[in-house]
Image (spheres, helix red, strand yellow):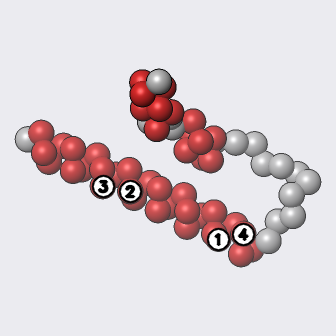
């Protein structure tokens, strides 16, 4: 049971599908929504780079 929760916690499927999904042609396209998603993607990338930097710094 605990093993399943841990596996679910480290599941990165949602992050991957956020970056690599097909555009839905039926969704309304607004400038504000595109900017919001752009900022979200940027913040996720910066966070992951910071985590990688901290891990590398800790190992050296």
Residue placed furthest toward the bottom:
32
Mark 2, Cα crowd under 10 Å, few <14 / some 14-19 / many 20+, is few
| Mark 4 / mark 3, whichever is N-terminal | 4
Marks 3 and 1 sit apart, C-alpha to C-alpha, by: 22 Å
- Locate residue 14: give its quadrant: top right
- Residue beneath the point at 72% across and 69% down: 33
Give the residue drawn at x 86%, y 58%: 27
Q: Position of residue 3 (x, y in %)?
A: 42, 24
Residue 25 vs residue 5, the one in the foreground: 5
Residue under pointer 4: 33
**Contact (CB < 8 A) between labels 4 and 1?**
yes
Is residue 36 shown above or below 54? Answer: below
Labelled disc at residue 35: 1
- Residue at 42% x, 32% y is 6
Is residue 7 shown to the viewer in this render?
Answer: no
Q: CA distance from mark 4 to mark 3?
A: 26 Å
Q: Earlier in the sequence, mark 2 or mark 4?
A: 4
Q: Farthest residue in the left direction?
A: 60
Whole-Å distance between the Cαs marked 4 and 1?
A: 5 Å
User: Is mark 2 in CB contact (under 8 Å) with mark 3?
Assistant: yes
First-in-chain label (1 vs 2): 1
What residue is pinned by disc 3?
50
Q: Position of residue 24 (x, y in %)?
A: 83, 49
Expressed as whole percent of the image width and height from the top left, the position of residue 25 reads 88, 51
Residue for badge 2: 47
Residue count near mark 1 (Cα–Cα under 10 Å), binned few <14, some 14–19, many ≥20: few
Give the structural element (helix, strand or loop) at label 3: helix
* CB within 8 Å, label 4 to label 3: no
């Amino acid at each position: 049971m605990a093993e399943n929760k841990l596996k679910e916690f480290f599941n990165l499927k949602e992050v991957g599908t956020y970056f690599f999904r097909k555009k839905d042609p039926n969704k309304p396209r607004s400038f504000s929504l595109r900017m919001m998603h752009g900022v979200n993607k940027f913040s996720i990338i910066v966070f992951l780079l910071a985590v990688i930097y901290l891990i590398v710094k800790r190992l050296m």
